[in-house]
Image (spheres, rainbow, N blue to C red):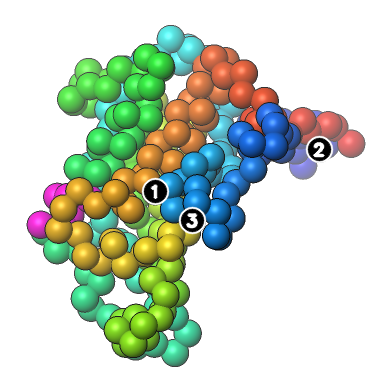
Amino acid sequence: MSHKRLAALLASFMVLGACTQLDATSSAVPERGDPAFLEAVNARADELYVNRETQAGVQGFRTLYIAPANLADMQVIQPEGATADEAWRVTESEEKIIQKAIAREFSAALSFDAAFNIVDSQEQAKIIVNTSLVAIHPNESRESVAAGAKLGGAITVSIALVNAATGAVMVRSVDTKSSDDIWAFNQVDNDDPAIDLIFRSWGNSIRRGMLQVQGRSRDPLVQPIVLKQQ
């Protein structure tokens, strides 16, 4: 493959990352022990993959449909040496609560500042948000938690913003976020705020990615990598 063709292929995607800082207070990600850590303040996905080839004609897209998330293929990655824990399997009643939490938090984030209009069906939408819960990563086994171990862990999700007319992926995020209370996900019986905070952060990230595709973002934290021909 020639250098020109390789450069063109690589340039079809640009990676958006937290490369520069606004200021010390707005860009610093809270660490453990910081009161803002559990509040998901300044939380954001580290990277988004933006398909530049889909930009033509999508600058005016505003209507967006949040498709039901796929929870069927979610894996539970147990701590080293722990046996399989079937109690992590999402029940039908739990899935309804999780779907509601995802839809609510994504809607709030994507419609913020009138960025996008959320519609009730794919037929009304220019953009479709597809979400898959990929894995749950509890740091400790159920036995360890019962004995007093900490409740931390993480969730991995895959999100794609798709052109409803063509099926082309415009923005994709595959990201893992940690939580000091991952076990809230295993005890879903109401609108648990611990779950809401995680999905709220992802909603904000994909909003920024789509605004970048449409040339409507001036977020100085989002700096594309510039690929130069060798």
Give x and y (percent) for residue 116. 36, 18
Number of the front mark, 3 or 2: 3
Q: Nearer the viewer, residue 199 or 126?
A: 199
Q: Residue at x 25, y 71 (%)?
A: 88
Number of the front mark, 2 or 1: 1
The residue tagged 2 is 2
Q: Nearer the viewer, residue 180 or 131?
A: 180
Q: Amino acid at mark 1?
A: Ile
The residue tagged 1 is 198
Q: What kind of secondary structure does the magenta stretch mostly adopt?
A: helix
Q: Is residue 163 left or right of residue 18?
A: left
Give x and y (percent) for residue 184. 29, 62
Asked if one can make out residue 167 in the rendered structure from this viewpoint, the answer is: no
The span from disc 2 to disc 1 (Cα, nearest Å) is 43 Å
Callout 3–callout 1 Cβ contact below 8 Å: no
Q: Residue at x 24, y 44 (%)?
A: 101
